[in-house]
Image: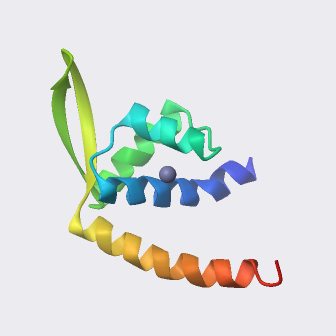
C-alpha cells in the first residue's frame, strides 16, 4: 500500500515533534497519532522508534511505572536539529501544495 509508506514520513515527524516536547512512550504516541487520524500498528511503531534511536535522533530510558517497565523516548540534540530542518521544509511544502486553497 503506497499511502502507508507515504505517510510514514509524516508519522516520523510527529514522533520527533512530540519527543522534542517531552518524553513519550509507545502507547502514548500511538494514541496521539490515532487522534490525528493515523492508525499505526505496534509492528510499525516500535521498529520506527528503534530506528530513530539507532540513527541518533531519539534516546530511550526505561522506567518502572505501576510495576511495569516502560520505555520512554526523548529527542537528542540531533533529533532537535532534524525537527528544525523538517519545519523549514514543511513550511515551504505547505506554501506550495496549499497554493490557491
Ligand atoms: Zn500530535
Q: Kindly give the residue lying farthest to the front in the view shown.
A: 101
Quadrant in the rendering for residue 84: bottom left
Q: For residue 47, what is the image quadrant? A: top left
| Residue at the image point whose x is 37% and y is 51% from the top | 51
Q: Quadrant of the C terminus?
A: bottom right
Where residue 15 sits in the image (x, y, percent)? 43, 52
Please determine whether, in this image, residue 37 is positioned above or below residue 85.
above
The percent position of residue 96, horizontal first and vertical second, equals 71, 84
Could you tell whether 41 is left or right of 47 in the image? right
Which residue lies at the image location 60% right of the left edge and 47% below the top edge?
A: 36
Question: Residue sitting at 53 percent across and 53 percent down?
Answer: 11
Residue 97 position (above or below residue 2):
below
- Whole-percent x and y of residue 14? 48, 56
The residue furthest top is: 67
Which quadrant of the structure image shows residue 20?
A: bottom left
Which residue is farthest right? 100
Nearer to the camera, 14 or 5: 14
Q: Nearer the viewer, residue 75 or 43?
A: 75
Q: Residue at x 65, y 44 (%)?
A: 37
Task: Tell which of 100 and 50 is nearer to you.
Answer: 100
Residue 39: image location, x then y, percent: 62, 38
Q: How is the image coloured?
A: rainbow
From the viewer's side, name the closer residue of 13 and 22. Answer: 22
Amino acid at each position: 500500500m503506497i499511502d502507508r509508506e507515504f505517510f510514514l514520513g509524516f508519522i516520523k515527524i510527529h514522533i520527533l515533534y512530540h519527543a522534542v516536547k517531552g518524553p513519550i512512550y509507545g502507547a502514548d504516541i500511538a494514541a496521539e497519532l490515532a487522534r490525528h487520524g493515523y492508525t499505526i500498528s505496534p509492528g510499525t511503531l516500535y521498529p520506527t522508534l528503534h530506528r530513530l534511536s539507532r540513527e541518533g535522533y531519539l534516546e530511550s530510558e526505561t522506567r518502572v511505572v505501576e510495576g511495569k517497565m516502560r520505555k520512554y523516548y526523548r529527542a537528542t540534540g540531533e533529533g532537535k536539529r532534524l525537527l528544525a530542518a523538517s519545519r523549514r521544509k514543511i513550511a515551504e511544502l505547505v506554501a506550495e501544495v496549499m497554493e490557491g486553497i
